[in-house]
Image: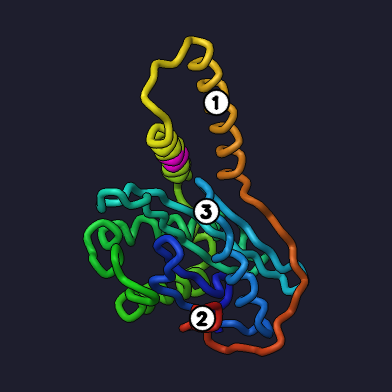
Amino acid sequence: MLKGILWSAICRNDIVLTEAGEDFYDGAVIKVAQKLLKKKATAGWEFERSRKDGLRGMKFHLYEDSDVEGSSMIVWSFVSVTESSLAEEEAKSFLEKLVYITEAMRCDDKVWRNGDLLAAQASFAPILLDKMEQVSSQGRLAMVNESISTTKEIMAENIQMALEREERLESLDQQAESLSAMTKQFKAKAQQIKRFKMWQDAKHGLLLGTAVTGVVAVITVPPLVAILA
């Protein structure tokens, strides 16, 4: 029985590529996972919680420009549902480690970049499960990252990419014309306010509590997305 990290998954945009875990909470893990997967991607962290069952859900995003001309950017999501007794910093560290150990696959593996639902399940789910079990077998403090500066850098890059993409989309809808000094000043101020708000959302996410309990108990999560679909 898993303790600490109960379920986790890695997604490309809205596609769950791989997942692993168990649900001994009468469907509560599934409900938290479902709410997390439905949350709109931000530049940083998103949160969900089931206070009644003592569960915490967490999702971290990584933005990347698509290598297909004309396509939208890729948003990678690293998701987990944990026991509330697992410190938030340790849960974040677990997801941060997933970001780095999947870097090569996200960059070069066609299955990861173009595959459909559960395309990476056979190859990566055992690795994912092993990393989850390490949280219990090696001690939770082993998951604490030495530094969170790298995560802050990712969040800053996410925000910059989102703003640049928004600017490119706006330029496509507008005729090319020189902006007055007042217009430029207003745009710079608006972007400064938007950047501040995005930083706040990225750092703190949106925390929603829920006490809803599922009807059916599910012992093993994979393939959980078949239930969520």
Separation (CA) of disc 3 from disc 2? 20 Å
Q: Could you say which quadrant of the image residue 212 lies in?
A: bottom right
Q: Mark 1 points at which residue?
A: 192
Identified at 70% across, 82% down, the residue is 214
Identified at 44% across, 55% down, the residue is 96
Q: Name the residue under label 3.
A: 41
Depicted 160 relative to depicted 70: above or below? above
Q: Is residue 3 visible?
A: yes
Identified at 37% across, 54% down, the residue is 74
Identified at 44% across, 43% down, the residue is 158
Q: Nearer the viewer, residue 192 or 220?
A: 192
Q: Which mark's residue is nearer the viewer, 3 or 2? A: 3
Q: Which mark is residue 224?
A: 2
Q: What element carries label 1?
A: helix
What amino acid is labelled 1 in the image? Answer: Gln
Q: Please report the bounds of the magenta region as a residue range.
A: 158-162
Precedes in sequence: disc 1 or disc 3: 3
Precedes in sequence: disc 3 or disc 2: 3
Q: Could you say which quadrant of the image residue 40 lies in?
A: bottom right
- Residue 123 is left or right of residue 28, and the answer is left
What amino acid is labelled 3 in the image? Answer: Ala
Label 2: how many residues lie within 10 Å, few (<14), some (14-19) or many (20+)? many
- Residue 229 is left or right of residue 125, and the answer is right
Q: What element carries label 2?
A: loop
Precedes in sequence: disc 2 or disc 1: 1
